[in-house]
Amino acid sequence: MRNSRKTRNAIRLVALGLSAGVTTAASAGGFDIHEQSTVFLGSASAGSAAGGSLGSMFWNPAATAQFPGLNSESSYTLILPYANIDIKNSAFGSGSSGNIGIDATTSASYGAMQINKDLWLGIAINSPFGLATKPNNVNYPGSYLGVTTKLLTINANPTIAYRIAPGITIGAGVQMEWAQAKLQFRDLITNSVDRFGGADWAFGGTAGITLEPTSGTTIGLGYRSQMTHDIDGSFKTLVPGVSGPATGTVNLPDIVTLSGRQVITPTTRLLGTVEWTNWSRFKDLPLSLPVGGLSLPANWNDGWFFSVGGEYDYTPYLTLRGGVAYEISPIDSATGRLVQIPDNNRVWLSVGASYQWTEATTFDVGYSHIFIQDGGIDLKTAEGSGGLAGLPQVEFQGSSQAAVDLVSFGMRTKW
C-alpha cells in the first residue's frame, strides 16, 4: 500500500511539472526572464534562493527540502512591455519605431515529493529566457538592424535534494532546454525582409545549498549553468544564391543567486537577494549561411541584480509582501544596445499578497513596474563573411526608451 501511494504521487509529480505552457518576452536584463514565481515577483525576487515558496527551486534546487509531502506551485504572468527606438542619424534618414514590445504571457510550474526524512525529488518547467519584439512602424530606418525578433525557451529541470545534516541541504538537477528563434531584418541590397528561423536542444545543470545556521535564518545559494544553442534552421532572402540552411548561435549565461530570509517577528520576515549573470558570454549574434555568414556584434558585460523586500502576515490567512530591486544591465554602451533589446539599468518596484483559501490551497498575486533608464544607440548593420564579405555596413545613431509592467497570478497546493 505504501509503495502504491508513492507511485501515484510520482505520477502526480510528473503531471504537475508538465502542466506549464510558455509564451515569453524578456523583462529582466538582457533577455533573462525573472518571472518564475508569483510569490517572488511580489518581493522583487528578494529571498528567491532561500525558500519560503516551492518556486525557489528555480534558483536553488535545495529549497525543495523545506516542503514535506507532495507539493506543487504554478505561476502565470502577463508581461506588458513598452520600448521605442528613435533613429536620429543614418543614411536612411531618421524615424521612430513606435512600440516594439509585444504583450506576452509566461508560466512556471513546480512539483516536489518527499521520499524519506532526508530526500526529495522535484521537477520544474520554466521559460528562463525569451524575447519578442516588432516595431509598430516596420519601415523605420532601424528596420535594417531588426524587424521581428522572437526567442522562446522551454526548460525541464528534474532535481534532487538531500539533507546531509540538520540545517544543511544540498540539491542538484539537470536542465533540458528547447529553443526556437525567429529573426527578420530589412535587406540593404533588395530592401525586402530577410528571414531566419530554427530550433535546437541544449543541456545543462543546476546546483544549490540551503543553510539554516540559527532558528529563523535561512541562506540559499544556487547555480544555473551556461548553455549554448546552435539553432539549426533556414535563411530566406531575395539575394541570389544566399538562401538555404543556416545556423544561429546563442550563448546563454550561467547564473549565481545568493539569498537570505530572516524572521524578524513571528509575523514579519526580511528578504534579500544578490544575483550575478554571466552575460559576458554574449559577444555577438552569428548566423552561418551556405556562402559565409553574418554577425551582429554585442559585447555585453556581466549583469548584476540586487533586491530587498519583506513579508508580513496581516492575518493567519493573508500575507502581504513588497520589494525593490536595482539591476545593472549587461549593456553599458550605445554600441551594444541592440534595437531588438533596448536594455539599460533598471529599478523594480513590486507588491504582492498570498491568501490561504484552504488548508491545502494558497492563491498568490503579484505586480511589478520596471523603470528602465533611457539609452543611446550607435550601431552598424551586420558584418558579412565568406561570400558576403563585401556587404556594406551602415551606421545608425539614436536613443531608446523602455518600461515594463508585470501582473502575476499563482496557486500553491499541498496534496
Image (cartoon, rainbow, N blue to C red):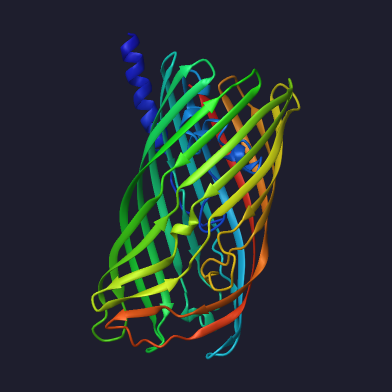
- Image location of residue 93, percent across then percent down: 57, 90
Residue closest to the far top: 1
Residue at coordinates 44% horizontally, 85% vertically from top-left? 393
Depth check, front residue: 292 or 58:
292
Numbered disc total: 0
Residue at coordinates 40% horizontally, 69% vertically from top-left? 183
Image-quadrant location for residue 136:
bottom right
As drawn, 53 above or below 367: above
- Image location of residue 351, percent across then percent down: 70, 42
Residue at coordinates 51% horizontally, 43% vertically from top-left? 256
Left of 85 or right of it: where is 125? left
- Image location of residue 156, percent across then percent down: 38, 41
- Image location of residue 12, percent across then percent down: 38, 26
As drawn, 42 above or below 85: above
Can you see residue 140?
Answer: no
Can you see residue 368?
Answer: yes
As drawn, 62 above or below 88: above
Residue at coordinates 31% horizontally, 59% vertically from top-left? 230
Image-quadrant location for residue 307:
top right
Where is the N terminus found, in terms of image quarters? top left
Image-quadrant location for residue 94:
bottom right
